[in-house]
Amino acid sequence: MLPDSRAIAWNELAAGAAASVDFVISAEELDQFAALSGDYNPLHVDTEFARSKGFEGAVVHGALLVAKISQLIGMYLPGRDSVWTGLALQFRKPLYVGRQARVEAIVEQLSPATGMVLLKLKVRAGDTLLAKGEAEVLLVRP
């Protein structure tokens, strides 16, 4: 059974509305993503190689962070009736396997004429900013 996605009506959205998703990427999930994407760069899949290049360990693929943003948008803010139309993301620091992280979104702007929602995004591990950016999301209305 699939989880239910939250459905937020247009008139329930307001600038400043926020949502977040906490997550941890396991070594198994990293391996599954490498297989799915075909990205076996040793910085992602070989802990010793990554350490030899100055990282603390295997670096989580940036696309896995984007997948968590997709979860936040599609399931929580704005939720079920939305599809994103644009994403701009700047990566600042790496996320490592097994570390607790959070993706956060805040509604920055709403356009009633087009049904567009602009979300400001941050991905953090504790107090460390891993990535920041914004997403443009279309809230489909009946």
Image: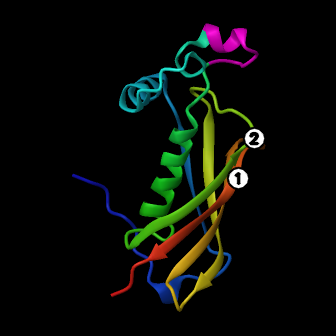
Q: Is residue 55 left or right of residue 24?
A: right
Q: Is residue 76 left or right of residue 142?
A: right
The image quadrant that residue 55 belongs to is: top right
Kindly identify the residue that appears in the image at 55 percent across and 12 percent down: 46
Q: Which residues are magenta?
A: 48-57
Asked whether 50 falls inside the magenta stretch, the response is yes
Pick the front one: 86 or 107: 86
Query: What amino acid is at disc 2?
Result: Arg
Q: Secondary structure at mark 1?
A: strand
Q: Which residue is tagged 2?
A: 92
Measured as percent of width and height from the top left, residue 111 is found at: 58, 86
Query: What amino acid is at disc 1?
Result: Lys
Mark 2 surroundings: few (<14), some (14-19) or many (≥20) residues within 10 A: few
**Number of marks in the rendered image:** 2
Can you tell which mark lies on residue 132?
A: 1
Mark 1 surroundings: few (<14), some (14-19) or many (≥20) residues within 10 A: some
Q: How is the image coloured?
A: rainbow
